[in-house]
Image (cartoon, grey):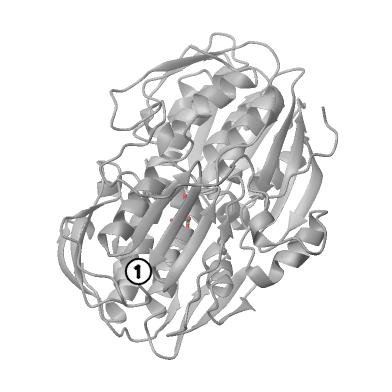
Amino acid sequence: MFSKNRCFTWLVARPLSIARAARFAGFPAHFSWDDAPRGRVVGPHVFKVFDVSSDNPSSENPSSPTSALTARRGGPISGRVRVPGDKSISHRALILGAMTVGETAITGLLEGEDVHNTAKAMQALGAKVERGGDGVWRVHGVGVGGFMSPRAPLDFGNSGTGARLTIGAVAGSPIKATFDGDGSLRKRPMRRVLDPLERMGLRTLEQAEGGRLPLTIEGAGEPIPIEYESPVPSAQLKSAVLLAGLAAPGETTVVEAEATRDHTERMLKHFGAKVTVKHSGEHGRRIILQGQPELEPAPVVVPADPSSAAFPLVAALIVPGSDLVLEDVMTNPLRTGLYKTLREMGAEIEALETRDDGEEVADLRIRASSLKGIEVPAERAPSMIDEYPVLAVAAAYAQGPTVMRGLSELRVKESDRLAATAEMLRINGIEVTIDGDDMTVVGKGVVPGGGMVATHMDHRLAMSALVMGLNSEQGVKVDDTAFVATSFPGFTELMRAIGADFS
Ligand code: S3P
């Protein structure tokens, strides 16, 4: 069962690097892109223009009526599965594909609601977006500065990444566009991206109170290049400035005090832009983009999302007797703070096979483990910012307190995740304290359960609560699983297939 698997996901394989990737993956040197293994996807594909009115064909769907679910203690979590493609890379592949002249081929795209909304937005801005089968997409871009004014407001649903990155991308086209989203996204701060983009020449024509959605902007055409010191550790903010900087003459620089996920920088280089990354301070980076590059289309293969993999991974750690393999998980060090933390807590997580071509990828074997509480330093937060709710679940099953420091950014996620995570645990019998930006979960190795968790339109809270139920004494109920489809379509089915008792 755990024999070496031929798993060939690599990211951003430019034609020139295919021979290298092929050798790495055990292919003969004459291997060509046409022979490229595409995970579960089989060709030939018939591409159809993405239907902007289509819904995500998954069972969990934010536009469907709310759906409660209960997770109960059952058998071990075992098997070998691949979670869907990485959300951050999927958004970026669509947006950069739309800003490139020519055809960008994407495989393994996450087909969740958030990414679908970005695909629809790119189409409304003038790019042609086509789907050829599961995860197989093509984008015919319009080039940097080539977007056209959309006829209707762009609706980003639940997605801060889609909205903020697209605001940055639109800042470099002389067009007007209105951005909107669901009740959760309308509460989230957009000023953080508007402030630097206004310095670059973007005009905010209309905005809801506090710089929130819905808002209407007018792009600059030729933005002014700036040097920007990011006041918050946010990859979305950094990416918005860099995407605007593509249309600017000269150098656009972003300085971040703490390094955040670097998929935008990596993908910009992959599409031919000149990006220089230097160290800045103890944990930070200085990213310099040379503006007005000729972006060239380049194929993107999206690895499995480490933030989605976190849910079956923690489930396997906390349910006795579990032994699970997760395939193709992206292990970019700026995304895997959770894995490091869990290992420090005593988790048995083994990398069976590792690959690297643009982004690091591994197959991970996870076995049920006795966990102990630890202290998680604040500087690790950006590399695991989406994983705190599920880390809190692991901490509840550990022995002793786990102290998580520096969580201020959790307050501005799809929900106030700091408050919502604490509430999720308390209602299920776990002692939690919040002191400023730090949260302490007192683990006793046992979770009483019995609580009904309010998910606040937050997909990661819903999935974390369901994972928590899997070894709880009385089960854990969530009020609404609909938003799970924003990032992890097929979550319920995948979890049931590896042994989860959800009903
Ligand atoms: C993301 C960045 C993070 C993360 C989000 C995805 C991205 O947000 O929480 O899920 O793809 O850039 P912030 O940049 O606001 O921290």
- Determine whether the residue tagged by mark 1 lies in a helix, strand or loop: helix
Whether residue 119 is visible, yes or no, is yes
Q: Is residue 412 left or right of residue 271?
A: left
Q: Is residue 420 above or below residue 267?
A: above
Residue drawn 33% across the image and 59% down it: 122
In the image, 223 versus 198, the foreground residue is: 223
Q: Position of residue 198 (x, y in %)?
A: 27, 76
Residue type highlighted by circle 1: Gly
Q: Is residue 18 above or below residue 162?
A: below
Quarter of the N terminus within the rendering: top right
Which picture quadrant has residue 246? bottom left
Q: Is residue 247 left or right of residue 303?
A: left
Label 1 Cα neighbours within 10 Å, binned few <14 / some 14-19 / many ≥20: many
Which picture quadrant has residue 402? top right
In the image, 174 versus 215, the foreground residue is: 174
Q: Position of residue 301 (x, y in %)?
A: 59, 55
Q: Position of residue 101 (x, y in %)?
A: 41, 74
Which picture quadrant has residue 367? top right
Residue position for label 1 = 168
Numbered-mark total: 1
Q: Position of residue 121 (x, y in %)?
A: 30, 56
In the image, 503 versus 21, the foreground residue is: 21
Ligand 1 is within 8 Å of the C-beta of the residue at disc 1: no
Whether residue 234 is visible, yes or no, is no
